[in-house]
Image (cartoon, rainbow, N blue to C red):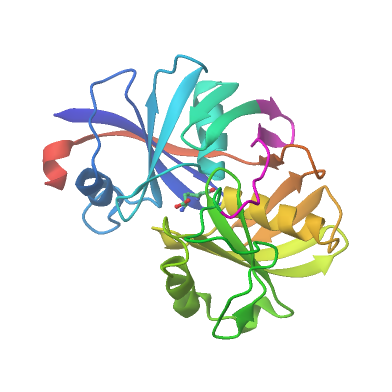
Amino acid sequence: MRFAFDKMHGLGNDFVIVDARRQPVAIDAARARAVADRHRGIGCDQLILIEASGEADLRMRIWNADGGEVEQCGNALRCVAALTGATRIETAGGLVAAEQGGGGITIDMGAPRFEWDAIPLAYPLDTAPLPLGWDGLAGGHALSVGNPHIVFFVPDLAAVPLDRIGPVIETDPVFPKRINVNVAEVTGPAALRLSVWERGAGLTRACGTGACATAVAAIRQGLVSGPVEVRLPGGPLVIDWTPGGTIRMTGPATHVFAGEAEWEAFA
Ligand SMILES: N[C@@H](CCC[C@H](N)C(=O)O)C(=O)O
């Protein structure tokens, strides 16, 4: 059966977006992996499904390239808001608000959570910092911004082999739902440089929720003050947060092309 899709990206974090309001679609892990495959499929970091919502303009569901369905995706939220004009989007990670403006799309991502069972961890532990270390990376701050993140601040980002250590931390049994691994360097009073090993997708050009989690962890420790420019390999996002408040993320959303494909081609 044929289906229509849009290919979009936020700073190089790329998505295949399928609107299930316009066509019957059933996604499972195998289908998500097949579509995301960069050699045999369309290729993307995440497959995004738009569905009708009873409480917002639409519901957005997210599958990582490894086929796992997850709660939240900051860059995809901006893309879906730009594609559809939605201002209220329901996700498994919470209800968010979107605004279109001159400087890009702004998403109000909701409030971060710092309790061990909200992330979740496998058992009670301090989360800021977490009293655990992995091969030279210690003192990470764990938090949820709708999905789970751990953030490490280091003096030299280039010296961290995130491709090697990222998968080890992602799959540590202390994180029962696995975790997104962020490594950041403070580059100014309101500036961070960030690399992200994404749960289920590996190293990506950008991670919106990773930028949110990292800016929150840095503001909370007094390392920077908001609004913070978070520079990722694919470009910058601006993140603002005041303790006790919600996180605002601003950045671009780029439409690359619209296409059609057949599910049978991915079998
Ligand atoms: N690229 C995303 C995050 C996608 C989901 C993440 N890999 C997870 O498993 O939680 C973003 O822009 O936030």
Q: Give the range drawn in magenta.
A: 99-116
**Residue 192, picture quadrant:** bottom right
Q: Would you say 4 lies left or right of 246 here?
A: left
- Inspect the magenta stretch and tell me whether residue 85 lies in it: no
Which image quarter: residue 221? bottom right
Number of disc labels: 0
Nearer to us in this view, 71 or 8: 71
Looking at the rendering, in which quadrant would you find the N terminus?
top left
Q: Which residue is drawn at 26% across and 46% down?
A: 35
Q: Which residue is drawn at 50% across and 51% down?
A: 13
Would you place residue 254 above or below residue 186 in this image? above
Q: Where is residue 189 in the image (x, y as percent from the top left)?
A: 88, 62
Place of residue 101 in the rendered image (x, y in percent of width and height, measured from the top left): 72, 28
Q: Give the vertical position of 62 relative to 140 (above or below).
A: above
Instruction: Please state the horizontal and vertical placement of residue 233, each as a whole percent of the image.
Output: 60, 63
* Residue 135 in view (yes/no): yes
159 lies above or below 60: below
Judge whether residue 233 can be spotted in this image: no
In this picture, residue 213 sits left or right of residue 21 = right
Q: Where is residue 187 in the image (x, y as percent from the top left)?
A: 80, 68
Q: Which of 36 and 114 is in front in this view?
A: 114
Query: Which residue occupies the extreme front position in the image?
Result: 124
- Extreme residue in the top direction: 54
120 shown above or below 93 = below
Q: What's the residue at 56%, 21% (across, down)?
A: 85
